Amino acid sequence: MSTSKPTSKPYPGALIVAEGIDGSGKSTQLYLLKRWLEISGFRVHFTEWNSSPLVRSATKRGKKKQLLTPSTFSLIHAADFADRWERQILPLLEAGYLVLADRYVYTAYARDGARGCSAEWLRNLYRFAVKPDITLFYRSPLEISLSRILQNRTRLKFHEAGMDLGLSLDPRESFRLFQGMILEQYDSMAEPEGFEVLDGTQSVHDLQIRTRSLIRKRIDLECYRHEDRGGVGHN
């Protein structure tokens, strides 16, 4: 079984990926980046993990009945990703868009790896996925990320908390342990996958400034400007 890394891109667009454990601040930063790029007149498309309408209902049923093994859970997410790749991500990259992805294949590598799926199997499963132009890894200490999540949640979902792994009978403790396992997976990928590691403890404003700076450094944004619009908001 092949463990080859994602191949080089065969399209004019650019793929920007945000990764991190729950509560790391990545979704907020990607939303702010999206709004800045849109206001500045660039062609932008946003996509997020586990959002394919064709797969969502099957995922919901499997989770509700607690029937998903680690491998079936992984296969469902892979089907979701493949559907979005074929219908959304690749066509827009081929059309010359900046595609912003809130989680990418690295989420599968981290979460499914924490659930015991082999790295070789996972990378073969997603072998069709190209390597992003930039992967932003928002690294936040576990306790800070957990406090952000738990202060806004009255109840943690079964699989979200990693209860299927039998880590603890307490959902909050299970969630803490599961997120720690996922963070270890991310840390092991950061250097070999070329992640840009950002300090998730910084203020939202400072972190967004750093995010935009990295994007400018790695991507020639002017290639993605709408031809009929002038740009504003270049700060």
Image: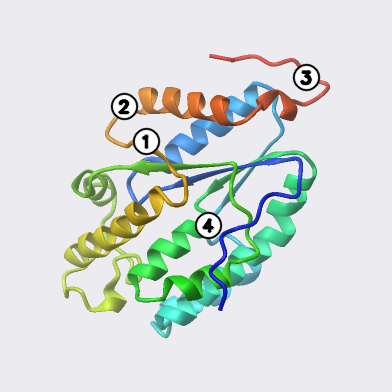
Residue denoted by label 3? 229
Residue denoted by label 2? 203
Q: Are marks 1 and 3 in contact (CB under 8 Å)?
A: no
User: Viewed as shown, does residue 167 lie left or right of 1?
Assistant: left
- Residue 201's x, y, as percent? 27, 34
Q: Callout 1: helix, strand or loop?
A: strand
Residue denoted by label 4? 49
**Above or below 175: residue 17:** above
Earlier sequence position, callout 4 versus callout 3: 4
Earlier sequence position, callout 2 versus callout 1: 1
Would residue 83 be visible to someone looking at this image?
Answer: yes
Earlier sequence position, callout 1 versus callout 4: 4
Q: Callout 3: helix, strand or loop?
A: loop
Cα–Cα gap, marks 2 and 3: 32 Å
Earlier sequence position, callout 4 versus callout 2: 4
Cα–Cα gap, marks 4 and 3: 30 Å
Earlier sequence position, callout 1 versus callout 3: 1
Q: Label 3 crowding class (10 Å Cα cut-off): few <14, some 14-19, many 20+?
A: few
Q: Which amino acid, by three-letter code, is at mark 2?
A: Ser
Cα–Cα gap, marks 1 and 3: 32 Å
Instruction: Please tell me which residue is depicted at 26% across the width and 46% down the height of the picture.
Output: 145
Cα–Cα gap, marks 1 and 4: 20 Å
